[in-house]
Image (cartoon, rainbow, N blue to C red):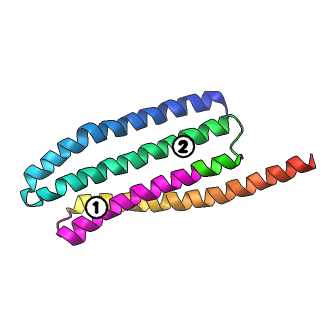
């Protein structure tokens, strides 16, 4: 991968990570306070839901870090290195973790409290579907990466 592609990608990944940090530090507390004012009967959920939102954001940030590391490996033509598989697995763990956090909040609101607003429910279902789709896509791409890595090692032996 060319350096002229990697540098902007890394810069955008850093901006995304900072944006998620801003959400964690500013938007989550503001939304939690608003949630507490609108639904005083659900105040006991403010802290756990805020923690869930911050945890989901942390998974996203760690996933962005894994993507950045994979981009650096690709830039150095080391994407077929066995270390790349660890970063791909890390990205899969991050996607699965964020999806599970959203699923837990969805289940709590829908089945535990019985008060999941339709727009929020549809948004969480969309995020869960996106998470499962990305996870399956990464599983397919990991298999392709393994095959390409094996083919490259075999070709290196021949040449």
- Residue 67 appears in the figure: yes
Q: Quadrant of residue 103?
A: bottom left
The crowd level at tag 1 (other Cα within 10 Å; few <14, some 14-19, many 20+) is: many
- Residue 112: within the magenta? yes
Q: Could you tell me which residue is drawn at 25 percent across and 58 percent down?
A: 120
Query: Which quarter of the rendered picture does the N terminus lie within?
Result: top right
Q: Which residue is mark 1?
A: 105
Q: Position of residue 72 (x, y in %)?
A: 62, 36
Query: Which quarter of the rendered picture does the C terminus lie within?
Result: top right
Main SS of the magenta part reads helix
Q: Which residue is mark 2?
A: 67
- Residue 91: within the magenta? yes
Disc 2 element = helix
* Region in magenta: 88-116
Q: Could you tell me which residue is drawn at 12 percent across and 56 percent down?
A: 43
Judging depth in this view, the residue of 137 and 59 nearest the camera is 59
Q: Is residue 60 left or right of residue 136?
A: left
The number of discs equals: 2
The crowd level at tag 2 (other Cα within 10 Å; few <14, some 14-19, many 20+) is: some
For marks 2 and 1, the one nearer the N-term is 2
């Amino acid at each position: 991968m060319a350096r002229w592609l990697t540098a902007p990608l890394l810069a955008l990944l850093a901006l995304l990570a900072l944006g998620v940090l801003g959400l964690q530090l500013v938007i989550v507390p503001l939304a939690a306070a608003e949630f507490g004012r609108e639904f005083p009967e659900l105040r006991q959920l403010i802290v756990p839901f805020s923690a869930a939102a911050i945890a989901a954001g942390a998974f996203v940030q760690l996933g962005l870090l894994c993507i950045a590391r994979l981009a650096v490996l690709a830039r150095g033509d080391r994407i077929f290195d066995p270390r790349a598989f660890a970063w791909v697995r890390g990205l899969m763990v991050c996607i699965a973790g964020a999806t599970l956090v959203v699923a837990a909040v969805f289940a709590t609101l829908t089945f535990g409290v019985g008060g999941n607003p339709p727009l929020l429910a549809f948004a969480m279902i969309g995020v869960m579907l996106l998470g499962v789709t990305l996870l399956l896509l990464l599983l397919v791409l990991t298999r392709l990466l393994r095959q390409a890595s094996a083919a490259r090692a075999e070709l290196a032996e021949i040449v």
